[in-house]
Amino acid sequence: MVAVSILQQLRAARKERNSKLILRRGPTAEALLALAGESGTGTVFWNRRYEPALTARNREIERRLHAHRIAAESCPGNLLAARRAGRCKTTEGLP
């Protein structure tokens, strides 16, 4: 499959830079909670989606992350001009 080959190439490119590509399958909240626990992260970031079902899912994921004392930050996604642009920044303070 082409998708598998592309993912293998991306995984190899990440490895060359001392990083890694982690893929998960299953319910989003459970996968994020498991990955956050394994990696020891304190914050999970994602691109916001605006479809009603996905907005509700994102609120639930945020609630569950907070229940495990993990911060949740959603960044504007799929917009040409976002009202909240610039909210998510790197550790250097850059957008």
Image (spheres, rainbow, N blue to C red):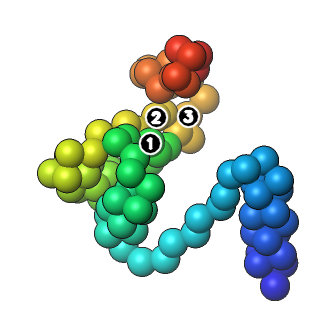
On-image quarter of the C terminus: top right
Circle 3 residue: 79
Q: Amino acid at mark 2?
A: Cys
| x and y, in percent, of residue 39 in the image | 44, 55
| x and y, in percent, of residue 15 in the image | 76, 57
Badge nearest the viewer, 1 or 3: 1
Q: Of marks 1 and 3, which one's residue comes earlier in the chain?
A: 1
Does residue 90 lie above or below 1 as drawn? above
Q: Are marks 1 and 2 in contact (CB under 8 Å)?
A: yes
Quarter location, residue 53 = bottom left
Q: Amino acid at mark 1?
A: Phe
- Mark 3 lies on a secondary structure that is loop
- Mark 1 lies on a secondary structure that is strand
- Outermost residue to the top: 93
Does residue 39 lie above or below 17 as drawn? below
Give neighbour class at mark 1: few <14, some 14-19, many 20+ (Cα, 10 Å).
few
User: Front-most of 16 and 43?
Assistant: 16
Can residue 95 be seen in the rendering of this structure? yes
User: Front-most of 63 and 15?
Assistant: 15
Does residue 18 lie above or below 83 as drawn? below
User: Front-most of 76 and 30?
Assistant: 30
Does residue 40 lie above or below 7 as drawn? above
Circle 2 residue: 75
Kindly identify the residue that appears in the image at 36 percent across and 66 percent down.
Answer: 34
**Residue 90 relative to residue 41: left or right:** right
User: Distance of mark 1 from mark 2, alpha carbons?
Assistant: 7 Å
Circle 1 residue: 45
- Outermost residue to the left: 67
